[in-house]
Image (cartoon, grey):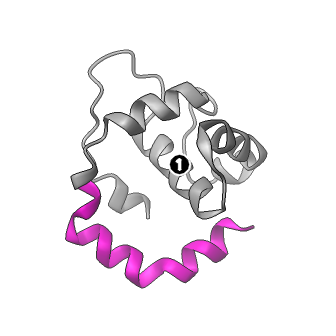
């Protein structure tokens, strides 16, 4: 999954404290796990931090709810319509859900 999200362009130009991939993956996984809202995403990530650190850097810890929101809102949604994303999600949907419910 991470290799596909690395295809996204980072909309930020300065004050970058968290890797874009960390923000995207937390937002996507929390959503798939049924979390709603930025606070919910943050709380989910805090609860799963040990697991997330097995494949995300989280160099400055879990991004705050405001950071998650600001960055995700600035990503061009057309990037997620790329054929690579659709193929990835179609093939791996079940595996993703099983992996993140650990």
| Above-or-below relation of 94 to 36 | below
Question: Residue at position x 53%, y 48% from top?
Answer: 27
Residue 76 in the image, given as x and y percentages of width and height = 25, 44
Q: Does the magenta stretch include residue 88?
A: yes
Q: Which residue is drawn at 45% across and 47% down?
A: 24
Q: Position of residue 89 (x, y in %)?
A: 40, 74
Q: Residue furthest top?
A: 15
The part of the image, by quadrant, that contains residue 91 is bottom left
Residue at image position (58%, 57%) is: 31
Q: Is the magenta stretch mostly helix, strand or loop?
A: helix
- Taking the image as shown, residue 23 lies to the left or right of residue 31, namely left
Measured from the top left, where is residue 90 in percent x and y? 39, 81
Quadrant where the image shows the C terminus: bottom right
Q: What stretch is highlighted in magenta?
A: 79-102
Is 46 inside the magenta-drawn segment? no
Q: In what element is the residue under mark 1?
A: helix
Residue most extreme to the front: 36
> In the displayed structure, does residue 93 sit left or right of residue 36?
left
Q: In which quarter of the image is residue 33?
A: bottom right
- In the rendered image, the quadrant that contains the N terminus is bottom left
Vertical placement of 78 versus 89: above or below? above
Disc 1 designates what residue?
A: 27
**Left or right: residue 87 compared with residue 69:** left
The residue at the point 49 percent across, 41 percent down is 23
Q: Which of 62 and 36 is in front in this view?
A: 36
Mark 1 surroundings: few (<14), some (14-19) or many (≥20) residues within 10 A = many
Q: Which of 44 and 34 is in front in this view?
A: 34
Residue 2 vertical placement versus 17 (above, below): below
Q: How many numbered discs sit on the rendered protein? A: 1
């Amino acid at each position: 999954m991470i290799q596909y999200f690395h295809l996204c362009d980072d909309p930020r130009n300065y004050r970058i404290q968290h890797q874009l991939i960390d923000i995207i993956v937390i937002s996507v996984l929390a959503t798939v796990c049924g979390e709603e809202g930025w606070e919910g995403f943050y709380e989910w990530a805090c609860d799963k931090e040990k697991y997330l650190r097995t494949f995300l850097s989280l160099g400055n810890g879990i991004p705050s709810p405001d950071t998650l929101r600001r960055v995700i809102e600035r990503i061009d949604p057309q990037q997620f319509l790329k054929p690579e994303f659709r193929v990835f999600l179609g093939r791996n949907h079940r595996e993703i859900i099983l992996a993140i419910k650990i």
